Image (spheres, helix red, strand yellow):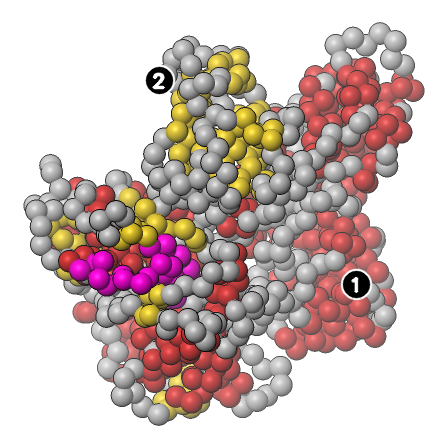
Amino acid sequence: MTASFRVGIDLGTTHTVLAFAPVAGGAIEVFPVPQTIAAGEVAPRPLLPSLRFHAAEGALAAADLPLPWPSDEPAVLGAFARELGQQTPGRLVASAKSWLSHPAVDRTAAILPWGAPEDVPKVSPLEASASYLRHLRQAWDQAHPDAPLARQQMVLTVPASFDDGARQLTLQAAALAGLPAVHLIEEPQAAFYDWVHGHQADLAQQLAGTRRLLVVDVGGGTTDLTLIEVALDSQGQPQLARTGVGDHLVLGGDNMDLALARWIEPRLSGGTPGSRLSAIQLAQLTQRCRSAKERLLAPGGPAETTVTLQGSGSRLIGGARSATLTRADVDRLLVEGFFPQVAADALPQRARGALVEFGLPYAADAAITRHIAAFLQRQGGALPDTVLLNGGVFHAAALRERLLQTLRGWRAPDAPPLRLLDAPRLDAAVARGAVAYAMARAGSAPRIRSGAARTYYLVLDDGQGICLLPHGTPEGDTVRLDARRFSLRLGRPVRFNLATSAVDLRHQPGELVDLQGEFQRLPPIATVLQPQAGAAGQVQVLLDTQVTEVGTLEMHCVAADMPRQRWKLEFQLRGEAAAQQADAPVAAHPRLPEALAAIARVYGDKKQGVDAKEVRQLRATLERLLGERATWDAVLLRALFGALLQGARRRRRSLQHERSWFNLVGFTLRPGFGDPLDAWRMEQMWELFGPGIAHSHDSQQWSEWWTLWRRIAGGLDAAQQQMVYEVIAYYLQPAGSTDIDQPEGPPMLALDELLRMAASFERIDTAQKTQFGGWLLQRLQHAPSAEIWWALGRLGARQPLYASLHHVLPPETAQAWLECIALQHPDWARQEAAAFAVAQIARATGDRARDLPEPLRLRTAEQLEAAHAAPSWAAMVRAVTVLDEADQRRVFGEALPPGLVLLPQ
């Protein structure tokens, strides 16, 4: 069936808007969505009983909830959900789109509402996003039964700064909602498309004098910045090209609502020291502050309003607390906090700010003006002469005028005045612009060119590079290097290195270039390309390269003799990775060949002439050749691992062969992630877990075996960690316990290392972590040791080293553990291992869903200080801090490879 409409959907954090226009021609309209009132929020269906309770107060009644179409959607959506979330805390899923781009959580796991009690049903960020897309599809299909939404020309909008993972999840959410064929466009670009569409009849006149246009899109969840260059063609018509995209900033209206909530919080508690709302109560207050903000900032709004936080349960009405919020308060907090007047050379403050809540990685600096200044500096420093503002935040005249005042202050006194483009549809412009983009794709409207702003090169081993994609190549155009062939290994790891230059050096595709000077190195992409039918081993390939419409560099390796065989690689060109400065390529250690030869001599095919002493001293030999092993960097470690992996089958030659192999392979692969090929390496290692230990009678052998898996635990997925835990659970319980039956097979030895390994499994079920922690507390009561304290601290830590944040134990469990420790070990603060364990369990994260009550944390910090524990330990309990190298080493159990830093989640 041929599409009848072009449809644009703005996947907003606080508003979801669907716009459309007939393919045959006609105006762009906004589709009225029943019951969602265009809000992209979800609340689970169990709220229904509470509706009946509130009906007498004029709130929503259960009869309001049935949809006008058959639906098995287990959630209340949109404005209803928002209102219900204000009435019944702990059941509202908000900011689903921000969660979809959160790198520190498993976005496919059922983790929302964040911080909700265990009895509240939960959904994943992916499913939450799919649910309101599904709602839109059903609403549209009911209104247009002859033109189902899935068959229309559809464009979804995403923040310009969304990385490739978040974009792919957006497409996956659309597919789950029954919308399999969609295009993506960036929100700021869509907003400008809407403006262009409204002025296409006199576009040249409207853009006369405009050469550099800045789009500032401040939505509910993100701030997006985009630069568009305007040039005139030979006929005097403007040609539009997007030339710059800002970093991903979780900074928008949600942060403003949270700032108001945190300001009003002590006024609700009467200023009682240490009295803080729970995560659920703060979420409810934030929703109330959003409504208050919208009332106060509306044209003709009141001078003040009352914000009321309801009680819960039997204290619903009697437990309500109220405070007054004035227009002056809002202006001061939001204008000065988010749009301070700063200089054009200002930079964001790197200190972690107060706006860290609900598990989301909010921008450390809330000052949007500083982020704009930094963005323009990265784009060469030239200031825009025209600006387009978009997003519901700019409904507030005070915020809009402060931003314009700051931008105008950056211009030279004799420069023409900054021009503000009219934007009458702040809430609908993005969805409307997505429709205009669909028109432009069909050739019926002006199009913004989004060519490659850089030249890209494939880096060769000798420091030279081959030009893959010249500067200015239009997005979507494929460049094939016909004159160059490459040999590709199939079924084995391959690595591709990329360099880029912002300077147009006019290199041509396939040209060999000396990579000296203004070049930046991008992170490598490494993968295993699987053989296809008719191809195996080595294959000769050509390279096809293009910049996609969503901003990624896409490369295909095409078999030279069988063009239908293609292998796809994608380099992500945006975000933090793309901004890394060019470092000199890591040079191989000059004695690496000798080290590899030493490994091959011990674990190679030929074993003649290798005595037990040489096997036993292999580690010492490697250190003699390469230096102390604590100095081996990640590149060197992975090279050594590759040699050890090749000798995996020969590790069982003797007890000493196996012991040395366990020791070295775990050390060279730690922490199991961090290099692009580590996922493949972990696949190879996992195949070795089943066979286990050949020389199982020796306790030291077991110790090395457990240490190996502790070191690389971060590379095991949840299912693998769960499997290992279930295999070893019997040995984790204290003597005399009958919770777990003894498994078959030889007994497992080296209990201390076994406990440490199990505690490193951050992805196991919460219930099993809780049970394991209880066992450790029992062990501490009878035979305390540094190893048990370390395991307990790692298990109850508020901040995981590598796992998704939803794997952290509930604060109630951690608090119960601390109470048990205080009772059984009153002098814990004077024992170094115990003190660090407690500091980990009580550590502040800024996320109230994970943090312990503030009075308990402050009391714990005071005890650490009184016992003269390390100052950093009390500091991490009092406030959000980043672990120093020594504490990070203590948490991991040993030093990480030089140059590898575990980023804070």
Look at the numbered disc 1 and give the secondary structure of its residue: helix
- The residue closer to the viewer here, 474 or 727, is 474
Work out which residue is located at the far right of the displayed protein and give it: 613
Contact (Cβ within 8 Å) of mark 1 with mark 2: no
Question: Is residue 226 on the magenta stretch?
Answer: yes
Residue at point 22%, 58% (across, down): 204
825 or 216: nearer the eye? 216
Which circle marks residue 564 in the picture?
A: 2
Q: Nearer the viewer, residue 603 or 335?
A: 335
**Extent of the magenta region:** 202-230
Q: How many marks?
A: 2
> How much space separates mark 1 and mark 2, taking CA atoms?
62 Å
Residue 697 as seen in the image, left or right of residue 69: right
Task: Classify residue 123 by image quadrant.
Answer: bottom left
- Label ID, residue 351: none
Q: Residues within 10 Å of mark 2 (few under 14, many from 20)?
A: few
Callout 1: 10 Å neighbours few (<14), some, many (20+)?
A: many
Q: Measured along the vertical axis of the image, is residue 316 above or below residue 838? A: below
Q: Residue at x 73, y 48 (%)?
A: 892
Q: What is the x, y in percent for residue 125?
A: 41, 53
Location of residue 337 with respect to 147 vertically, above or below: below
Q: Which residue is label 1 attached to? A: 835
Question: Where in the figure is residue 569, as x and y percent of width and height?
Answer: 46, 31
Of tags 1 and 2, which is closer to the observer? 2
